[in-house]
Amino acid sequence: MFKKVLIVEDQEIMNQGILNTIKELNIPDFDYVTYCDEALNRIRTAFERKNPYDLLIADLSFDKDHIPQKLHSGQELILEAKKVQPTLKVVVFSVEKKAKIIDDLYKIYQVDGFVSKARRDGQDLKSTIRKIFNGETVIPQEVLNTMRHISSEFDAYDIKLLDLLAKGLKQSEISTSLKQCGMIPYGIRSIEKRLNELRDSIGAKNNIEMIVICKDIGLI
């Protein structure tokens, strides 16, 4: 099992739950901090002293207060921590629900696991840490299902189309914008046809519902 863990969480109740999980796993050395800047400093210092952390457990969002910070999110912390210690294992423990944002944690930030804050999150966190220690990358099944669907149905043209629609542009304006961007097809009939196909693919009744769904999963 991991020997040294750093926990970054600004909610005291959540911190206590994570600490209980760490103790149950018999991890002997652990620290917790509430600011991303402090976390990065600890990671850097531990690495320079040749006593690095084995695992980072971090939230994504942190409340602002009177203490100025250079790093404002878990994503920023993970990115900088990986520059210092590329092999550092990372678990994100967050209320985030948007599948696209969670998927980006794996593709862009190279995290090893994601645990959603919920009723059984202690057990999920414990299981995830054990799997990561054994060399696995732990991706929630619901995220896999959603992202497989998105990757098979939506391309760059579709995302641009939805983004323009979400901004309130009319189909004639969308057509003009697509033409200016060099994206085809940009004909109004083609745009209307593709919007119908996209609505059907995600089960939306109208364009408004489709935009809401796409925002919920983090596609736009």
Image (tube, rainbow, N blue to C red):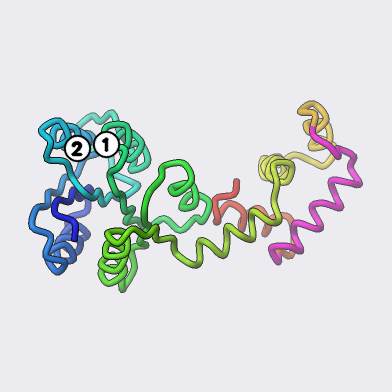
- At x 59% / y 49%, what residue is drawn? 219
Q: Amino acid at mark 1?
A: Gln
N-terminal-most mark, 1 or 2: 2
Label 2 packing within 10 angstroms: few (<14), some (14-19), many (20+): many
Q: Which residue is mark 2?
A: 43
Residue 85: assigned label: 1
Disc nearest the viewer among 1 and 2: 1
- At x 16% / y 41%, what residue is drawn? 52
Residue that protrudes farthest toward the front in the picture: 135
Label 1 packing within 10 angstroms: few (<14), some (14-19), many (20+): some
Q: Position of residue 70 (x, y in %)?
A: 28, 28
Residue that protrudes farthest toward the left in the picture: 28
Is 139 or 14 nearer to us in this picture? 139
Q: Position of residue 63 (x, y in %)?
A: 28, 44
Position of residue 99 in the picture relative to residue 177 (left or right):
left
In which quadrant will I find the N terminus? Answer: bottom left
Q: Which residues are magenta?
A: 183-203
Is 168 or 121 nearer to us in this picture? 121
Position of residue 117 in the picture relative to residue 188 (left or right):
left
